[in-house]
Image (spheres, rainbow, N blue to C red):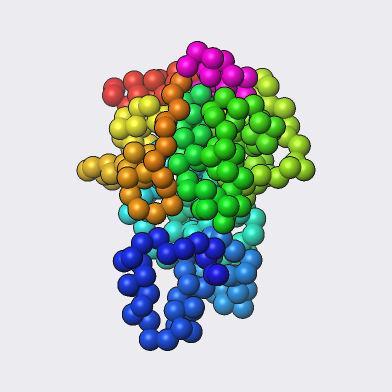
Amino acid sequence: MILGRHPENESAIEHHRQHESLSVFRKALLESAEFTALYPRTAADASDISFPSWEDLSAPRLVFVHSPKTGGTTFHDLLASLYAEDRVCPERFNGLKNHPAGMLAHYHLFSGHYDLVSCQLIPGEKQIVTFLREPVSRLISLYNFLKAHRPDVAERNEWVLAGLASDLDVADFFRHPLVTNHPYIRDGMTRALVDSLPIEIWPTVDEQQSLRDLSGAGREALGQLAGLAAFGVMERYEESIKLIFARLGIPRPHSIAHKMVLSDLIESEGNYRPIAVARESTELRSLIEELVPADLELYAGALELFEQRLRIARE
């Protein structure tokens, strides 16, 4: 009733059985980072927000703009390990606009499915980073990830994209008008850099929205990308981690534990189920390329820039 889902596993049930009363259990859920991320306006109590200090405002913020299915959960965990838990903003979707400025001022790490416009709401000096992925591969991976959600989970959360992926084969999915007009799918990586993403929780849909045509905007997005503190490409993950951490001037992790891997998800108990994984074909690539012309232009330019930065880093 509070988080909108069933308990994730038996250990979670056992953990919450330790609360001394139902009211204490309820309070723990209402004060959780998950509830705050889901319902920021309900969770935020403006009278509870402390005044920011000069130290709070002068501390540099690290901001990760996370496009879905670009290896972002793994990267988030690497970054979050460097910060105290209470300094990590709980907003993981595109809902920064819902948080009071006094609350945002408290956090030093921001990581979520933001667009660059929303990042300007974060106070203080910002170092913004992102990851890209080959656009067609990203969307096929996104389809498989959505399809792997159990139908009851998709229905309970009103994740219409997951419901469509469950009902449709991959080609019909990418022909569906709710998919072809979705901001995180139609040139989604470019849109995050040069436009707004008018949906907070990306697996949902808004049938009334109209999207700006971003054909030809890949070069504009590349300019925005070049102005960020750093970026990586998923296909060159370890090199990307080295380059990003070096450019940020923070210690590089000794190891990388990959998270949200589809094969792991479908083998674990929880919100996922086994599926027949969709693979790229000539016909499927042609179909998806029609949805991502700007992303393809952005990615091609990003690879050239990435190689340049690698060469400089090696010198």
What is the magenta segment's predominant secondary structure?
A: helix
Q: Residue 10: x, y in percent?
A: 33, 65
Counting labels gives 0
Residue placed at 66% from the left, 44% from the top? 205
Query: 55 or 226: which is nearer to us?
Result: 226
Residue ranking furthest to the left: 254
Q: In this view, does 244 lie to the left or right of 300?
A: left
- Residue 290 colored magenta? yes
Residue ranking furthest to the bottom: 21
Residue placed at 35% from the left, 53% from the top? 269
Residue placed at 51% from the left, 68% from the top? 53
Query: 56 or 134: which is nearer to us?
Result: 134
Image quarter hosting the N terminus: bottom right
Q: Residue 72: x, y in percent?
A: 43, 42
Q: Residue 258: x, y in percent?
A: 31, 41
- Residue 203 colored magenta? no
Residue placed at 50% from the left, 61% from the top? 5
> Can the viewer see residue 191 in this picture?
no
Query: 198 or 124: which is nearer to us?
Result: 198
Q: Quadrant of residue 161?
A: top right
Image quarter hosting the C terminus: top left
| Residues drawn in magenta | 281-299
Q: In which quarter of the image is residue 182?
A: top right
Query: 197 or 138: which is nearer to us?
Result: 138
Q: Residue 198: x, y in percent?
A: 68, 44
> Can the viewer see residue 268 in this picture?
yes
